[in-house]
Image (tube, grey):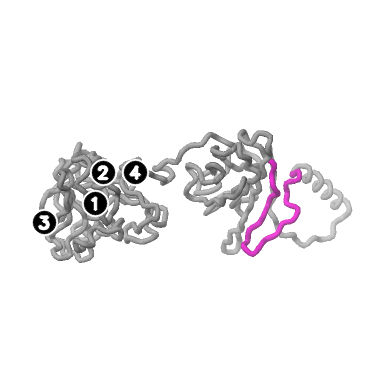
Amino acid sequence: MTYYYDDPVEEPVVKRKKPTAIFSSLILLFAGGLFLNTTLAANISINSGGKVEFGQGISITTACSGSSVLTATPNSSFANASGSGSFYFNSVTVSGIPASCQGADFSLSVYDSSTSSALPIFATNKSAIRIWNDGGTFKLGTGSVNGATITSSSGAFTVSFTTPVALASNVSRLTLESLSHVAYSCALDLVCALGDKGPGGGTVFYVNTNGFNCGPDHTSTGSPTGGLCNYLEFAPPTWSGQSLDPIGNATTSASNIPSIGVTQANSRTLAEMGRGYKYSNAINAVFGTCSSVYTGGRNFSGSSCPTASGMARAYRGGGLSDWYLLNAAELNVACQYARGGQAINPDVACARLGSDAPVGFTGDDTWTSTASSTNLDRFFALHLMVPTSYQQMTGQAFNLLVKPIRAF
């Protein structure tokens, strides 16, 4: 079905017209009324929040609703700009959804009056918002988790766009389809489980539903989406172009970088999760960065990529540039995941459980970006491929394994 809407406009000062002009205007208004049908809001009001209802509820049916009629009500909001501003299609409420639609996805799009292509409505260029009816609770569906929010009630939901894109004046038609449910994708939706393939093409080895600080400055807004991080993924063994994880030095001389020094008691804690990015950058600020990953062989010592953290930061898996050398806490949970046999907990040492051929690792002693606060040229490393896995402090000049990770 096709429905049309107009945005509210300010009434200009009306000058007296000749009778002929008035008669012509009445004809136009009558014709326009037929064209717009009854969906134009009878009363347009702007509330204290600046929201404008620019359309009455639309009666609509979908495949899952059968003879039950759903009601879709689009809303607009005014975005101020210097000397001007515009109304944008910013949310829609759908109600009257019957129990027969439980388990299905809804896909909602809007169109203008002249083209057959759906208008972009959120996240810069996305032209369809997908909503999942999870047993009567409505959730943002795959491809729509980022850039929108949703509120759910009995038989109804309201989906709102964080940054609306479509001008309300361009919206003439709304479509709502019911589709078979499609599960979330870790890479696309950032809804992941242990072992999933992450956005960077690595393996998700740590999940924290509460979130943790991350990013180059280890903050609560450091994630790629601007908030806390919930996941860590490590790179595949072939990340450097070799069949095995590469080996090399931690640094080219004594580090003497106090900001990466941690006591052994504090090196393996929840508070340290996500901090490897900051440590890696601190090391690279002293010893130099790498323009690209060294691919001339498995041992990169003495190459144009001088340090383990430099190699890790140069990795571009998935086209992403936020890979770094994992720290002691992050390597500890990577060991717990890779060996298996114990719960994943940053505050507990990787145990003598599970496999001695850890998933995703192709060698034994692995560097971290955490130095010992009592001896800054020694870095924490993990001996993880034998039954007696243990953390140790190793001189920076040894050739140990390098495994990049990223937080998201």
Q: Is residue 398 left or right of residue 196?
A: left
> Looking at the image, can residue 127 be seen?
no
Mark 3 is surrounded, within 10 Å at the Cα level, by few (under 14), some (14 to 19) or many (20 or more) other residues, namely some
Residue at image mark 2: 341
Q: Which label's residue is closer to the chain start, 1 or 3?
A: 1
Rendered-image quadrant of the N terminus:
top right
Residue at image mark 1: 332
* Mark 2 element type: loop
The x and y percentages for residue 50 are 63, 61
Between the C-alphas of marks 1 and 3, the distance is: 19 Å
The x and y percentages for residue 201 are 33, 41
Residue at image mark 4: 194
Of labels 3 and 4, the one closer to you? 4
Q: Which label's residue is closer to the chain start, 1 or 2?
A: 1
Mark 1 is surrounded, within 10 Å at the Cα level, by few (under 14), some (14 to 19) or many (20 or more) other residues, namely many
Residue 267 in the image: above or below residue 110? below
Q: Which label's residue is closer to the chain start, 3 or 4?
A: 4
Is there a contact, CB below 8 Å, between mark 1 and mark 4? Answer: no
Residue at image mark 3: 395
Of labels 1 and 3, the one closer to you? 1
Q: Give the range drawn in magenta.
A: 36-59
Mark 4 is surrounded, within 10 Å at the Cα level, by few (under 14), some (14 to 19) or many (20 or more) other residues, namely some
